[in-house]
């Protein structure tokens, strides 16, 4: 691809931003390494320059909203997470007191499913059954309802389980505030408009944030939310620029990818219960797992926490299943999506790249497919690793010693299950 020149018109706001990086790249000191140059460029650009999302519609969830209300709002706006506003905060509260965290669609569903898990041996002071766990968290009435629903082994869960769950008092009465600090709950760690791109990129990579809110301190409101996916899209739009090509034309192995090796990949088999797959993701703290055919040992699909939306938004598609396996789940979802493309535009597919893939090709693949991970395979199709959006961003910049200083004061320490 030919290099872009200064006289060309940018293709998009993201490409215009890339040209700004290009201008800074050209004036960096010659003795700096490419990585040091990129660090310096991104440190010089404020996050206020990041383009707004096309919809430019940032939603908020009130802390007293029920899980059912939160799921409906997230689904209606086709977003997977949103900041949570403390309804008890005074009107003049600062943003630190106004926002209590970021809740994810997947986190809500996985939390509900977790209430159904049979007990494992615990200490005498710890609840020892699904009934006791629910009682401790939400009151005896919810616990009794869990017992009435028969939420036990995932292997024997029938399709009408999800219909029962969406009409349960547990789902309709538990509030978002009740699940604060649980799986996939993130702290509300925001940036000011004047903070740098480098800060934002480090938070999205090394510090494992899925998205970073940017605040307008004057109004005390959220100006924009920058996600890992948005950064990858920006990078894809910068193809052809010198700074991008000097980095993007490298093979993934040259920048130390994949970070996750074959023996580290968490897998599920296609004949396992789908609830078991989501349980594994929660236990191992991963966002997706490849689906393996038991006889051949080959990967035949991918199931993601993003797919968990279909357990609540479209429970009717499982009604006829006696026990919903991972294979049944993926088949039913694909069939449902064919008939409801506008309502549910995405499902996580099994997308691969070869070991000789370049960073640029990988970024373009991720952006085109709107996915969060790619599996690396050899010529025989065997898994050799996986690469996530976070992994790619982590190879773009590095954290200078002492960079954050006291940045995290007031945010850390965090509940054990939160990220960052």
Image: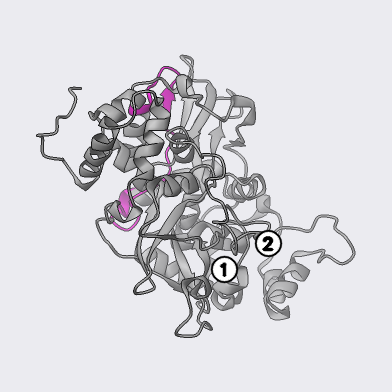
Q: Please tell me whether residue 413 is drawn above or below residue 266 in the rendered image.
A: below
Q: Nearer the viewer, residue 150 or 81?
A: 81
Front of the two marks 1 and 2: 2
How far across and down, in percent of the image, does residue 267 sit? 60, 35
Vertical arrangement, residue 403 with respect to residue 414, above or below: above
Q: CA distance from mark 1 to mark 2?
A: 13 Å
Scheme of image coloration: one colour
**The N terminus, quarter of image:** top left
For the residue pair 86 and 350, the one nearer the viewer reads as 86
Residue that appears at 37% across and 29% down = 362
Locate residue 134, reporting x and y percent: 71, 70
The residue at 61%/51% (across/down) is 275
Residue 319 visible to an observer of this rendering? no
What residue is disc 2 on? Answer: 116
Which of the two residues, 65 or 170, is positioned nearer the viewer here? 65
- Magenta stretch? 338-361
Magenta stretch: helix, strand or loop mostly = loop
Residue at 17% x, 29% y: name it: 4
Mark drawn on residue 164: 1
Q: Which residue is most to the right?
A: 124
Number of numbered discs: 2
Q: Is residue 321 above or below residue 72?
A: above
- Residue 294 in the image: state x and y as whole percent: 61, 29
Task: Please indicate, yes or no, whether residue 248 appears anywhere in the rendered image.
Answer: yes
Q: Which mark is residue 296?
A: none
Q: Horizontal and vertical percent for residue 62? A: 47, 76
Q: Is residue 354 left or right of residue 277?
A: left
Mark 1 or 2, nearer chain start: 2
Q: Is residue 198 magenta?
A: no
- Say which residue appears at 30% left-offset and 65% top-offset: 57
Query: Which element type, helix, strand or loop, lies under badge 1?
Result: helix
Say whether residue 38 is left or right of residue 406: left
């Amino acid at each position: 691809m030919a290099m872009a020149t200064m006289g060309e018109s940018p293709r998009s706001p993201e490409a215009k931003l890339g040209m700004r990086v290009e201008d800074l790249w050209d004036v960096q000191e010659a003795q700096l390494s490419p990585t040091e140059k990129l660090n310096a460029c991104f440190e010089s650009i404020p996050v206020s320059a990041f383009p707004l999302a096309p919809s430019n519609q940032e939603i908020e969830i009130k802390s007293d909203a029920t899980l059912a209300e939160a799921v409906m709002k997230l689904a209606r706006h086709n977003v997977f997470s949103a900041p949570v506003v403390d309804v008890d905060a005074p009107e003049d509260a600062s943003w630190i007191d106004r926002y209590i965290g970021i809740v994810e669609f997947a986190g809500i569903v996985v939390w509900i499913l977790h209430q159904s898990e049979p007990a494992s041996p615990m200490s005498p002071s710890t609840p020892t059954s699904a009934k006791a766990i629910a009682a401790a968290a939400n009151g005896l009435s919810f616990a009794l309802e869990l017992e009435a629903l028969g939420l036990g082994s995932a292997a024997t869960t029938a399709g009408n389980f999800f219909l029962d769950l969406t009409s349960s008092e547990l789902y309709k009465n538990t509030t978002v505030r009740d699940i604060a600090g649980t799986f996939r709950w993130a702290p509300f760690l925001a940036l000011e408009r004047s903070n740098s791109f480098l800060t934002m990129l480090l938070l999205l990579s090394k510090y494992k944030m899925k998205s970073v809110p940017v605040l307008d301190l004057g109004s005390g409101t959220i100006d924009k939310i920058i996600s890992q996916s948005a950064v990858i899209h920006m990078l894809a739009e910068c193809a052809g620029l010198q700074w991008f090509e000097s980095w993007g034309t490298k093979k993934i192995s040259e920048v130390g990818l994949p970070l996750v090796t074959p023996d580290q990949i968490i897998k599920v088999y296609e004949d396992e219960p789908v609830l078991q797959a989501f349980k594994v993701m929660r236990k191992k703290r991963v966002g997706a797992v490849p689906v393996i055919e038991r006889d051949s040992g080959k990967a035949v699909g991918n199931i993601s926490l993003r797919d968990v939306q279909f357990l609540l938004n479209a429970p009717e598609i499982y009604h006829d299943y006696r026990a919903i396996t991972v294979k049944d789940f993926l088949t039913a979802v694909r069939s449902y999506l064919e008939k409801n493309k506008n309502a549910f535009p995405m499902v996580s597919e099994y997308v691969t790249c070869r070991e000789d893939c370049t960073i640029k090709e990988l970024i373009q693949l991720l952006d085109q497919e709107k996915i969060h991970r790619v599996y690396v395979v050899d010529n025989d199709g065997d898994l050799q690793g996986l690469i996530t959006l976070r992994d790619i961003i982590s190879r773009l910049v590095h954290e200078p010693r002492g960079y954050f200083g006291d940045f995290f004061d007031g945010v850390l320490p965090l509940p054990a299950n939160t990220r960052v």
